[in-house]
Amino acid sequence: MPSLPACPGPRLSRRQMIQAGAASYFGLSLPQLLRAKEARKNTAATADACIVIFLNGGPSHLDMWDPKPDAPAEVRGEFKPIQTSVPGVMFGEHLPKFARQMHRCSLIRSAHHSVNNAHAAAVYCALTGHDRGEIGGGARPDDYPCIGSVVGTQRPPATAVPPHVLMPYITKEGAGGPPQPGFFGGWLGKPRDPLVVLRDPNAADFALPELTLGPDIDPSRFDARKLLSEKLSATRSTSSDPDLEGIRAKAYDLLTAPAMREAVRIDREPAKLRDAYGRNIYGQSVLLSRRLIEAGTRVACVSWAPDANATWDTHGSNFTKLKGELLPQLDSAYSALIDDLDARGMLERTLVVVVGDFGRTPKINTNGGGRDHWNFCYSLVLAGGGVKGGYVHGASDKIGAKPGRNPVSPADVIATIYECLGVPHDLELRDRLSRPFTLCPWGNPIREVLA
């Protein structure tokens, strides 16, 4: 066990000591934890946690958050605009509950980036702020880390829960394709990957048995096995895989973490509340996100698709899919989450982000009334955790094709998220070989959005 710094040195509070223990679980030394605290000194966090609802495939901004009722029919589409809780701000008609939350939200209508074809590259750009153009493909070990991986190193949970969790899918780049980038630890290493929940929280028998000891293993037997494993690890050569050791340590701690076992007991939520979120895999995943954040997880991410083409990628039947399935599910899950966080006194310190990889074309195609990829302008929504309520940042042009005012990039959005979470966007981090990387150097926090 490493010894504490000799005096004179930093005096540690009880909370810092708990964090130091959690940090060692995630592969951080006490000096690294203290350096992280020093780096955050000038970035006061307005949020302690973040829930990312990622609409994987590209949600149609024109049919959701940026309707164009005066545009030609082939642009404005089938949906009518409705008033939100902020006078003069309109949403599409199939987001009535979401619209009633607008006074708590910051809506950005002028996001854009360079990736129009490859979902993988667009997802990576949206979730890390690094725009690599149309270079597609799956997740790579040299990718920039996702938000949860970074926040987990800079603000480790005070309890032995995962710093970030991904659910309910590892979204593929097309059915049967490789996992999309942007959701993992990248050059921070495998131990920084999220805990992934791949079971349906809406299922009657939902549980994570991997978080419990087997029926033939009591706590004393488990402790004996852990001790034996540690002794064997100590006798191995220094060439042992550090990632494997870090993953093993996380697994041991999760098996003895009551907070995590309790967090996944979604069946303990009142039936009325579960109904409000929506009795489907996505609605219940959003509810599970709230439970995880409440238990101490820093970042929970819901990737809303098993593969990039399965849900929000509405090249065909855009209006049918949105009206019949996608928008009602999102409408219920988001509005229930905001109300739930507010009722629990958590909204003020929890940042909620709803975003996709890009938007959809202003002009409806001839493929059964679909809309295609459109990276040149799209919308996203932030709420809670230090952002303004009832605020609209930027605007698109008359047909939603290009930013008409205050354009922002994904790097700016990511920098804003980090700002709220108390992490400098220009923080220098080091990979497993101690090579320096600047987190998000070309992004700037969107100050107008911050409360």
Image (cartoon, rainbow, N blue to C red):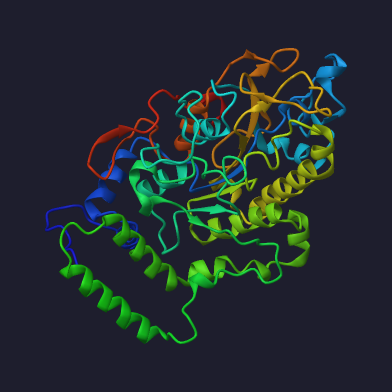
Q: In which quadrant of the rendered view does residue 227 lie?
A: bottom left
Q: Nearer the viewer, residue 228 or 256?
A: 228
Q: Nearer the viewer, residue 205 or 21?
A: 205
As drawn, which residue projects farthest toward the front?
A: 176
Residue 375 to residue 150: above or below: above
Asked whether, in this view, residue 254 is left or right of residue 358, the answer is left
Tally the marks: 0
Residue 13 to residue 335: above or below: below
Residue at the spot 30% in from the left edge and 33% down from the top edge: 437
Residue 193 to residue 61: above or below: below
**Residue 301 spot, x, y in % from top left:** 56, 48
Residue at the spot 71% in from the left edge and 25% down from the top edge: 372
**Residue 331 spot, x, y in % from top left:** 76, 44
Q: In which quadrant of the rendered view does residue 450 lie?
A: top right
Q: Is residue 451 visible?
A: no
Asked whether, in this view, residue 296 is left or right of residue 436, the answer is right
Quadrant of the snapshot with the N terminus: bottom left
**Residue 125 spot, x, y in % from top left:** 50, 30
Residue at the spot 74% in from the left edge and 25% down from the top edge: 66
Q: Nearer the viewer, residue 285 or 84?
A: 285
Q: Is residue 84 visible?
A: yes
Asked whether, in this view, residue 109 is left or right of residue 142, the answer is right
Quadrant of the snapshot with the C terminus: top right
**Residue 32 spot, x, y in % from top left:** 25, 49
Q: Nearer the viewer, residue 202 or 142?
A: 142
